[in-house]
Amino acid sequence: MSETRVHGPDVRTAHQDLHSEEGALRGEHPGRSRNPVIKVADLAWLEFEKCDLDRAEVFARDFGFGVAARTERELWLRGTYGGSPCMVIRRGRTSRFIGPAFRAAERSDLDRLARATGADVRRADAPGGGEAVDLLDPSGFPVRVVHGGERLPALPEQRPLLLNFGTDHRRTNATQRPPREPSRIQRLGHVVLETRVFGRALDWYLDILGMIVSDFLFLDGQRDRGPTMAFIRCDLGSVPADHHTLAMHLGPGTGYVHSAYQVPDLDSIAAGGEYLKERGYLRSWGIGRHIQGSQLFDYWRDPDRFMLEHFADGDLFSRDVAPGWASMSTSGLAQWGPPATRDFLGASPSPQRIRDVIEALRGDNEMDPARLLGLLKAARS
């Protein structure tokens, strides 16, 4: 399908300093498909299995989720925005990430997707029903595309604080006292995945789900070999969409890296972080502001070691913004904030990580010694 990916006439070929110092060079990956099967509208929810649903619910409430539904075997979590839940956690023998569910814009998209992939349209096992098509991406992640079903009503919001700026005084005769309480999550923002078959997986999401790339990262001295990370958004035409709904990077493993959930503002991130810290949870990295996507961020580990992010104030791009290109480096992850931790980078030499490296270098994938050395260099730069 690679021959179908070209720049359309409505795509800016110059980056115009919108989000990256560099744009694409001639012949580089354009970051979109001319004729995708469908164009997904958003990320619907993420699916996990965990051994202890009670413990998972305690952390979820402390992190700022609401509970949409709970049974003996399932826990559905939500934000304050109306629509679909953010996450489903099913009881399992081990704790693991299953895969993402994306929302189709139209019911007919499910039929089109089923015809193109040989899959079936079936009832979705989600609160409120709906229909779904179940797929498998090149990395081996189950990917569900859903449509219909009952939409959850909106919940009361955690209001952003009213701020004074210079001579712009919006708050007078009043103090600021953000409550020490959980950050109230508004919605699911994005998921980040690691894969050994980055190029094949990237093309699958562009060609099958119609997503488009906001930013590419490449390894220093290896740009001619193509990108090794992509920040990918939904193509909503002239309607601005999150800078990335999905991000993927090449690595020795195949799995979940983190997921991100929007909260109202910086005070919500900070006060919610203090609440989590007081309850003994591990902050992985934060607080800071990213470069790609510009989000204010704060990363935490749940009791099962999954990483989750609170974020606010992310970039929004319409379809006519072409991909930016930048060198991959640890220092390039943030505009300000503390240095990225070894925990966040996954740089600790655990037995599993060592096994991943050995298997990747022996397997039929895109990892080789040059790529591995380039990734290690990027982690130290």
Image (cartoon, grey):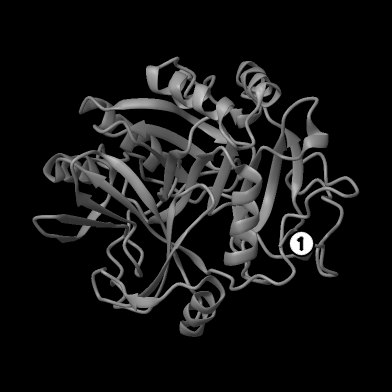
Residue extending furthest left? 72
Question: Which residue is rendered at x = 59% and y = 38% of the image?
Answer: 249
In this view, 302 is above or below 109 = above
Numbered circles on residues, count: 1
Pinpoint residue 25: horizontal percent, then vertical percent. 88, 45
Q: Mark 1 points at which residue?
A: 5
Judging depth in this view, the residue of 309 and 143 nearest the camera is 143
Tell me the quarter of the picture where residue 176 sits: top left
Q: Can residue 32 be seen in this view?
A: yes
Residue farthest along the right direction in this orientation = 26
Name the image quarter holding residue 293. Answer: top right
Q: Which residue is found at the position 80% from the left and 39% from the top?
A: 21
**Where residue 96 sits in the image (x, y, percent)?**
30, 41
Which image quadrant: the N terminus? bottom right
Give the amino acid at mark 1: Arg
Label 1 secondary element: loop
216 versus 346 height, above or below:
below
Relative horizontal placement of residue 198, taking residue 103 as reference (left or right): right
Which residue is at a point 58% across and 48% down the rendered structure image? 168
Q: Residues within 10 Å of mark 1 (few under 14, many from 20)?
A: some
* Residue 142 image point, x, y percent: 41, 55
